[in-house]
Image: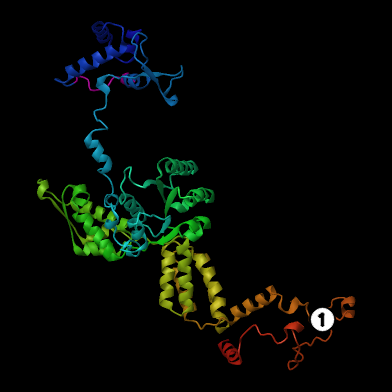
Amino acid sequence: MEMEQLLSMGFPSDLAAQALAATGGKSTLKATEWILSHKSCDTSNKPPSNPTPSPLQPKLDRFFHLQSKPNSSSGSPSIPIPAEQQEEDGPILLPSKRPRLFQSVTNPCSPAVHNNKHHPPHEPLSERMRPRTIDDVVGQDHLLAQNCILRSAIDCNRLPSIILWGPPGSGKTSIAKAIANSFPQDQNSSYRFVFFSAVTCGVKDVRDAVENARKVKVKNGKRTVLFVDEVHRFNKSQQDSFLPVIEDGSIVFIGATTENPSFHLITPLLSRCRLLTLCPLKPQHVQKILNRAINHSDMGLTQILGMRIEVTEDAIQFLSENCDGDARVALNALEISAITASTRTNSNDNFSLVANVTLDDAKEALQFKHFAYDKAGEEHYNLISALHKSMRGSDADASIYWLARMLEGGEQPLYVARRLIRFASEDVGLADPLALNQAVACYQACHFLGMPECNVILAQCVAYLALAPKSISVYQAIEAAQKVVRESTGQNEGVPLHLRNAPSKVMKELGYGKGYIYTPDNPLSTQTYLPSSLEGYKFLDWSVSNAKDWQETN
């Protein structure tokens, strides 16, 4: 039996027989270890004569990892193999003790591994430079300066439930982790901190976190500070699960979101939390963060690249002014530019090795700016509102600028063209009736051409509408008329009889059309057209002078 197993593993018969004789002939495992140990000793002094591996060698690996079965006489306890690794003939067991030859050489509890866990060698610079305490946070002084809301809450050890709303890279997650580091993590602390992301967590994770928070409060009296990143990704039922535990004080909820909470978070959750708005970082704040990353001896660029890094002032200024207040973008670009600069160094003396980061390196690393635009989010509506109001204010330059922002952000040209058609009637109206023709022609041309060729057509129409005279008289007239109809002013009377058609004899007998004056034949005659209860009511504010201007324009 043992001989057959050794042969099936690819060992020569003479070597297998020698191994069985040396180990007593009752354990395939011992025989295999003997073969490998003697074979390694034999090959350590001379190169192998045949470097080509045996075609049966994979069977040896499979033997140790999947197919080892305990000897009935060995008495060693065994553990089952997972079902996906079982053979067709039933569950396979692995010996609980493997030969020392195959033990891992890395001890997971060693100090070196422990340090790497805290500071992985390939951790991005933006993560390594994340603030450790509140005092390390740069910017957001309206929240973290002395006597401000968040700083005061931390100093008084009375954290409220908050929602941090701000653009990417403004410091939402950093502030949450800095808050956690501001409290002692021991038995005397009144808070325990739990962090998870709504991107990777589901309903079960939320329920478990809530239930554990209740248990901890009952057992130790500690409140759980639950930080949820990207909280806008939770649906209504998931957000509802936080309400009772926030209400009874079991958890202090800290949510972070880049989306407008008014659109993505339920009203009861907003009612229980204080909404704190974070602003994009200013260039001087980003410069301070970049200089810290350059000069930090433990977690900065020097520690990552193993050499001294020198960055020019114009490179730092370029990154800080073109990252749109996003510290993560600036730090990632700085790291890439430093790596690029390090490849130009050709020195064998690592102690004197210096990488000089230039402005060209920074431009190469940043490539192009990220445009803050979302086709279905708040920024979409912000930009179309800016375009509309700029045209209404007759500022053609600003109008074209906001149009360019939308197009570069990936907006569909037909959407913009539809908004221009609306603007042509709402804001230009009778002051320039040809504006509607221009807008409709713009829509048709954009439909024919598409992007990027239709950008000039959109810009032409935007400039025309911005420079055109404005009149909202038609817009006001239809709004006023609809309001009268909705509120039943004038009792919503029927059409006066003299304005009705009389296609039948019965209708004529009832008075339909009686007394109607055909104005082409009687241009000087007058008659009423509104219901009697609305006679004299004015909807369209169109004076005689405006009418003359309209006629001259046409």
Depth order, front residue of 283/333: 283
Q: Is residue 46 left or right of residue 187?
A: left
Q: Amino acid at mark 1?
A: Leu
Residue 450 position, x and y percent, is 48, 64
Q: Is residue 424 left or right of residue 137?
A: right
Residue in the picture at 27% in, 7% down:
20
Residue 531 position, x and y percent, is 75, 82
Q: Is residue 152 above or below residue 48?
A: below
Which residue does the numbered mark 1 point to in the structure image?
A: 497
Q: Is residue 302 magenta?
A: no
Q: Is residue 525 left or right of residue 512?
A: left
Q: Is residue 147 above or below residue 40?
A: below
Q: Is residue 215 above or below residue 332?
A: above
> Picture quarter containing residue 372?
bottom left
Bounds of the magenta segment:
48-58
**Secondary structure mainly formed by the magenta segment:** loop
Image quarter of the N terminus: top left
Is residue 376 among the parts visible in the rendering? Answer: no
Image quarter of the C terminus: bottom right
Is residue 148 among the parts visible in the rendering? Answer: yes
- Quick one: label 1, few (<14), some, or many (20+) residues within 10 Å? some
Residue in the picture at 50% in, 55% down:
269
